[in-house]
Image (cartoon, grey):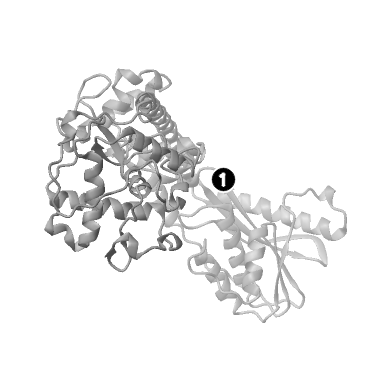
Amino acid sequence: MLTWLTRSFLRSLGSEDRDIFMKCLNGCHITQDAKVHCQEDGTDLCPYCMRSDSRYHRFWECEQFSKERASVSPDTWALLPSAPEFLTGYGWSLRPHTLLEWNSTLAQLVIPVAEPCVPSDHEFHVFTDGSCLNQAFPSCRVAAWSVTAADPRQPALCQVLDMGPLPGLLQSSYRAEIFAIWRSLCIARLQTEQVHVWTDCGSVVRRLQKILDGHEPKPNSSHSDLWRLVSQCLNDFRPGQVVVHKVTAHQQVSQASSPLEEWCFTHNAFADQTAMAAHRMRPPGFWRLFGQHVNATLACQKISRDVQLTLLAISKAVLRARDLVEEGEREDLGVPMQVTPDDWTPVGQLSIPPAARWYGDDVVRQVLSWFWQAVYDSTAELRWVSQFQLYVDFMLSGESAPTNYDGWKHGKHTPHVDLMAFSFLVRARWFSKVLRECLRHHGTKITFRYGRPHSRAVLMHTGCLALPWCQQRLDGVDSWLLSHSATGFHRTSKVMENVPVGSKDDHFMDVWQTCA
C-alpha cells in the first residue's frame, strides 16, 4: 500500500467525510460476518440483500448500493477480483510495481567528493539552487542541484563549480537546496576571505542563519542529516566568515532596479538553469525507469481513487439509512418506559433486617418506614419512579436523608449538609444506595431498570424503580423540581448538581417510624 497517496486523498476531503473514511481505513465498519460471533441468535446474512455478508460483498456486490458504484470505470472493475483486500475492503492506495526498483536506483546514486577551490585574494561569492520534477508526486520526484560562482569585479562572468542529481530516497526541491548549500561550503572551505552564499529559498536562509548564530541542528528535525553536515562543514570557517543572502526567485534581469539586483538576478537565473541541466547527468536507463514508474503511479492513483470514492459513498449511504432508522426510534426516547404488573410484588409486614443495621438502626428504620408508608396496601397505579424523585419525596416528607461523610450517619447528625460541597447528585446517590440495600436485606423484590421515568421534570434516562407511588406525591415532587429548573432536567444539564436540600412540604404526610 502507498500511504502518501492515501493521505493525499484524505486531505482532499471535508472534515465529516474524512472522519467517515478514516473508519474504513481502520476497519471500524464491521459487517455481519464478524458480528455473528458476538451476537446472540446472530446471522452472517447481509441486512440489505440476505446474502452472506462481508466487506467485499457490502462494497462491491450488494445490490442495495449499485447506484454508489455507477461511476467506477471498467478497468477498475476488471481488476477488483484480484485486487488486494487492503484496497477493496479498507481503501488504502495501491503501490506501483516499479516502486522497489525506483527506490533502489535512487539509493545507489553516488556523488563524488567535492573538490575545494584554491584560495582567492578576494571575497568568494557562490549561488546555489535546487530543482525538482514531479513535485506533486512524492514517490516520483526527481531533484537536482547546482553551485555556481560569481565575481562582482566581472559581473558577466558565470562559472559552474558543482552540479548533479540529488542522491537518496527523499527527493524534493527543498532538500536539493540544502544539499547545494552543503556542497558550496565544501568547495569554499579553503577560502581565507569572506564567503557569501546566495540562495532564493527563504526557509534555507533562515535555518542556515540559525546555525551561523551558534544553534545546533535538532536531530529529529526535517533533513537533519544534511543540516548536521552543513554544521560540521562550518567548523572549517572563522566566526563571521560565512554570510548567507536571500535572492528573489525567478526574476527577469529587465526587472532589476539597480546594478546589484541585475547582478543577483543574472547569477541566480544561471544557477537555476544549471540545476535543471543537472537532471541530464543521469544515465539513459534512469529515464526509461522514470517513465515506467510515473505511468504505474498514475494508474495506481486512478484505481485507488475509484475504489476510495466508492467506499466513501457506500459508507455515507449506510450511515444515512441508519439515521433514518434511529429517527424512528428517537420518537420513543421521550416516552416513559412501559411497566407491567409483574414488575411489582406487594410488600408484607415491615420488619427491620439485622443485616442492614450497619448503616445504623435509626437510618434503616427511617428509610424503610417512609417507604412502607408510601407503598403498603397502595392502590396507586404502578409507575417507574426515578431515584431523584424518591430522594426529593423523602425530603419533602420532612426527613433528613442519610449521608456518607466520615461514615454513614443519620441526616439529623449532619444538619448543615446544604453548606457542604455535596451536589444533589451525590446526595441522591447516597439515599438510593441505602434504600436499595435495605430492601435487598429485607427480602423485598423491587424491579430496577435504567430508563425514562414517569415525570414532568426528570426528562432523561436514569435508574428507576417500579412502584405503586401516589400520583399526587409525584406531582408535588415534579413541581418542586421545576421550581429550580423551569425546563426540567436533561442528561447534559448541569443544573441538577445545584438543586438545594428540600424542606417539609405540608402536602406530604409525616413519617411514622416503626418500633418493630
Query: Which residue is at the far right?
Result: 258
Q: Of helix, strand and loop, which one carries label 1?
A: strand
State how many labels appear: 1
x, y (%) of residue 352? 15, 54
Kindly identify which residue carries mark 1: 133
Q: Is residue 514 left or right of residue 27?
A: left
Q: Where, quadrant-wise, is the N terminus in this rendering?
A: top left
Q: Where, quadrant-wise, is the C terminus in this rendering?
A: bottom left
Tell which of 403 and 241 is nearer to you.
403
The residue under the point 15% across, 36% down is 345
Q: Is residue 478 left or right of residue 85?
A: right
Q: Amino acid at mark 1?
A: Leu
Q: Is residue 249 visible?
A: yes
x, y (%) of residue 327? 39, 25
Q: Is residue 246 left or right of residue 89?
A: right
Q: In the rendered image of this protein, does residue 135 appear above or below residue 182?
A: above
Tell which of 67 and 420 is nearer to you.
420
Q: Is residue 21 visible?
A: no
The residue under the point 48% across, 66% down is 220
Tell which of 201 and 372 is nearer to you.
372
x, y (%) of residue 195? 71, 73
The residue under the point 31% across, 17% down is 63
| Badge 1 density bin: few <14, some 14–19, many ≥20, Cα 10 Å | some
Q: In the rendered image of this protein, does residue 476 appear above or below residue 370?
A: above
x, y (%) of residue 130? 61, 55
Q: In the rendered image of this protein, does residue 48 appear above or below residue 136?
A: above
Question: Within the image, what quadrant is residue 67 found in?
Answer: top left
